[in-house]
Every structure is written in structure tokens, then in C-alpha cells.
Amino acid sequence: MQLNVPILHLLENSQNILIAGAGGGFDVFAGLPIYFTLRDMGKNVHLANYSFTPFKIAQIISQPRIELESILIGARGTVNRRFSYFPEGYLAQWFAEQGTETIVWMIAPNGVPMIKNAYDYLVHKLKIDAIILVDGGVDSLMRGNESNPGSLMEDTISLAAVEELDVPVKVLAAIGFGTEVEEDVCHYTALENMADLIKRGAFYGACSVTRQMSAFERYEQACRYVWEIEGHKKSHISTRIIPAIRGEFGDYHMYQNDDHSHTRLFISPLMSLYWFFDMMKVVERNLLANAIRDELTHHDMMIATFKFIDKQPRSARPRRQIPY
């Protein structure tokens, strides 16, 4: 059983596809079902992630490929020393243990110009002709004028950087509607933003990941491999997506001993849905993008983001409940 990806018509002439975690952390894992599906179709597919793991630590505990010093490295092979947060490295190690040497590219947190340089390097090195940015959650669809936009900054950095690349196909895929409890995302405004994107012709369609799919089995195996390394952090997004795909419902926790075990959840089938959008039209609506586009460092990005949010009228788009 295959994932019924609704963007295949866009990828018909694409042979070298980059799937990148937009918001960092474990977002690259949220793209694995798409990755496996496209690989099974014979496409050359590569993985990248906006990374929160310090490059210096990655170089001490593993042997990454250094491409652009302090900007872009590639996790590969074996992690020689345990570390509590190295999702890209352990994912690369999982691939190696499956008999596949797969580099998971790590892009360091920087300003948009530096992130754009890292992507541009990968585009030329790997001859990329399509990019799929993947968001675990839906805060990448926020505009910045919501009272509860979630952790929008990292997604916006990736969106603004990829916007400037000379690549013919650019797609945003979001999965995990309802998972972002800690980020306090307002899903009323998320749906409102989706509706507006549909109205603008920016919505390509949605599809469900189901438990019968080989792509799901491999996604779950990769996630469990990393999460169950002693002391390693777990994704609070994919630990909710996977139970949803398996049919769990309500206040269900995949693990009882993680940092989020006391969070009240509402697991539902909506979490298993991928939503696909025209990335260029998403970033056009993103009000934060212009405010941070020229900032050079991650620190400057944070200051610019706080200033932008502080200027937004508190009553512009207040939190509202879905009425059913």
C-alpha cells in the first residue's frame, strides 16, 4: 500500500528531490513517509534539516561530512559517543544499519542569507530540481498576526531562504494537525489560514498515512530507533502522529517517561494527514518573513521576531475555539 501523494504531477519531471525539515528538531522525521514513497518510485531523494545540534559536538561524537564550516554538514554513519540530542546523526546511523548509506544534511541556525547559502550549495551539489519543506505541525501556515502563532520563526526562516532558490518545484507539506500543544497553536486560525490558501489556489491536496503502508512502518522504525536510545530526547510531534496513525484516540501517550508525559493530549485521526501547499504562496502571506529576511544571525532573527510580534495588535486575530 502506497502513500497517495497528491503532488506527483508536480514531481513528474523531478529526479533529485530534497526533503527538508522546515522548523528544525525532528521535522525531518515527519518527512520520512514521503521520502520512502518517492524512493520506492525510483526518485533520488535527499534529506536535510534545520538543526539544533551544535556542529562542534556533532564533530566530536561522530564523523560528519563538512561542506560549509559552521553552516552545513552531513550526518553519516556511526555515532561514537552517546548524546541526548542528535536526531540527524542517529537517523543516519539507523539508515546505515539498514544497509543504506544516507547522509542527513544539517543546516545550522543562522539568518536567512546564511540558510539560503546552505540550501543553494545543496541545490548545486545534488542537482536538486524539487524541494519539499516539511513541517511537523501546522504553525508554518501562520502569518504572524495571530494571537497564538506557535513557534513560527524557524519555519519562516526556512520558507524565506528557500523562496529565493532557483528550483522549479517548491512545496510545503504539513503533518500533525493538533500536535502542537506546548506551542499553544490556535487551530481555528490554522484552519482559517488553510481556507485562505485554498481560495488563492495554493492547496495541492491532502493524504493520510495509514498503518498498512510500508512507508509508515519504516518511519515508525526510524523514530523508535532514535527515541529509544538511552537518554535521547523524543519528538513531541511524531510521538503523537504515530499513535494517531495506529488508531489511538484522546489523551494517549506513546511513552510514559518522556518530558511531555504530563501534558494533556487529544490524539485524533487528523494528526495522520499530510496537507500540501504551494510554498511560494505560503511565504507570500507570511508577514514575519519580510521582518527577518535580512537578519544575519540567529540572535538577530530572534530580536527581529520579538519586535515584530510586539507590534501586532493584540486583538487582530484572537484565539477562538473550533465550534464543533
Image (cartoon, grey):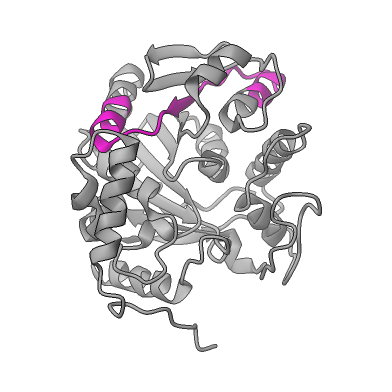
The answer to whether residue 119 is above or below residue 141 is: above
98 magenta-colored = yes
Q: How many numbered circles does the render carry?
A: 0
Residue 151 in percent (x, y) is at 43, 55
Q: Does 236 appear in magenta? A: no
Quarter of the view holding residue 180? bottom right
Asked whether 323 or 210 is in front, the reply is: 323
Q: Is residue 173 above or below residue 221?
A: below
Q: Is residue 95 above or below residue 2?
A: above
Name the residue: 70% across, 34% down: 226
Left-right relation of 164 to 252 = left
For the point 57% across and 11% down, the residue is 63
- Residue closer to the observer: 153 or 134: 153
- As rendered, which of 54 and 208 lies closer to the eye? 54
At horizontal 37% and vertical 60% (from top left) the residue drawn is 141
Q: Is residue 168 visible?
A: yes
Instruction: Please report the bounds of the magenta region as a residue range.
Output: 93-118
* Residue 167 visible here: no
Residue 66: x %, y % from top left: 43, 12
Residue 68 point in image, percent of width and height = 35, 15
Tell me which corner region of the image, top left, top right, bottom left or bottom right, holds residue 157.
top left
